[in-house]
Amino acid sequence: MLPLLSLLSIFFILFLLLLFLVILFWLTHTNQSPYYPTETYRLKLLIESGELKIDSNTKFIDVGSGDGRVVDLVSKYKPKLAHGIDINPFLTLASKLVFLVNRRKNVRIFNGNFFNHNFSGYNLIYAFIFTESLEKLLNKLNKEVDEGCILVSNTFRLSSISPFKIIDNFYFYKIK
Ligand SMILES: C[S@@+](CC[C@H](N)C(=O)[O-])C[C@H]1O[C@@H](n2cnc3c(N)ncnc32)[C@H](O)[C@@H]1O
């Protein structure tokens, strides 16, 4: 009995190790901006200070939403929509599970490539992705969003347009 248990434990540990390697491979090879979470307390300060306005008219999306922590934070301020999209199936599954437990009507997480997502209707877009992806995304946003849409980029700065506001490491851009 004991050797069988030890054998099962070894298989279980090997399975976990394999799973970890698969996740690591996915994180480093399937997209240009790897997973690195926003320090949400910094974003919370922006919202609480009124620098980042979120109200019942806000239609928000986090582009490359990772584990959904930004969507979670924003959704607490009762926007009309709080969406997230991420290419990494493990991260989207994890965030979907969290929102399954903490049900919120306005929240939705998509699994997929944000370059294939339709951004029409959103008026507040948050991104924590490399500048190269951000520039490419800007071209798409210019075609899809309505005037007045705001893009907030964490850390990475666009070179093609100037931010109208910079606070902490967050760059605020008006699209169009
Ligand atoms: C730096 S993390 C930011 C995560 C989250 N937004 C946050 O601030 O905590 C960047 C995320 O973008 C995702 N990502 C990168 N390229 C993507 C693409 N083309 N489509 C969808 N998600 C992408 C990665 O999987 C990763 O989770």
Image: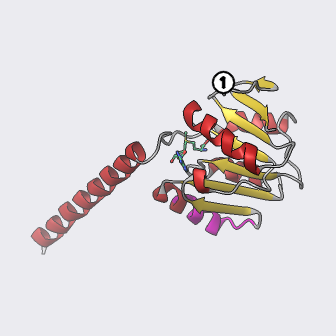
Q: Quadrant of the N terminus?
A: bottom left
Quarter residue 78 falls in: bottom right
Seen at 80% across and 56% down, the residue is 121
Is 15 situated left or right of 100 in this image?
A: left
Label 1's element? loop
What secondary structure prevails in the magenta region? helix
Picture residue at 63% right of the left edge, 49% below the top: 69
Q: Residue furthest bottom?
A: 1
Front-lying residue, 163 or 55: 163
Foreground pick, 63 / 8 = 63
Q: Of 136 and 103, which appears nearest the observer?
A: 136
Using the rendered image of the protein, determine whether residue 62 is visible from the camera's viewpoint: yes
Residue 124 x, y percent position in the rendering: 78, 46
Note whether ligand 1 is within 8 Å of mark 1.
no
Q: Which residues are magenta?
A: 94-104
Q: Is residue 137 shown in magenta?
A: no
Q: Quadrant of the C terminus?
A: top right
Q: Mark 1 sits on what residue? A: 159
Q: Residue at image x 74%, y 56%?
A: 82
- Residue 135 in percent (x, y) is at 63, 34
* Residue 68 horizontal side relative to residue 11, left or right: right
Residue drawn at (68%, 39%) of the image = 138
Horizontal side, residue 147 vs residue 26: left or right: right
Q: Where is 119 relative to 106, above or below? A: above
Q: Residues within 10 Å of mark 1 (few under 14, many from 20)?
A: few
Residue 38 seen from this side:
no
172 in relation to 21, above or below: above
In reply to whether residue 98 is colored magenta, the answer given is: yes
**Amino acid at circle 1:** Ser
Q: Quadrant of ligand 1?
A: top right
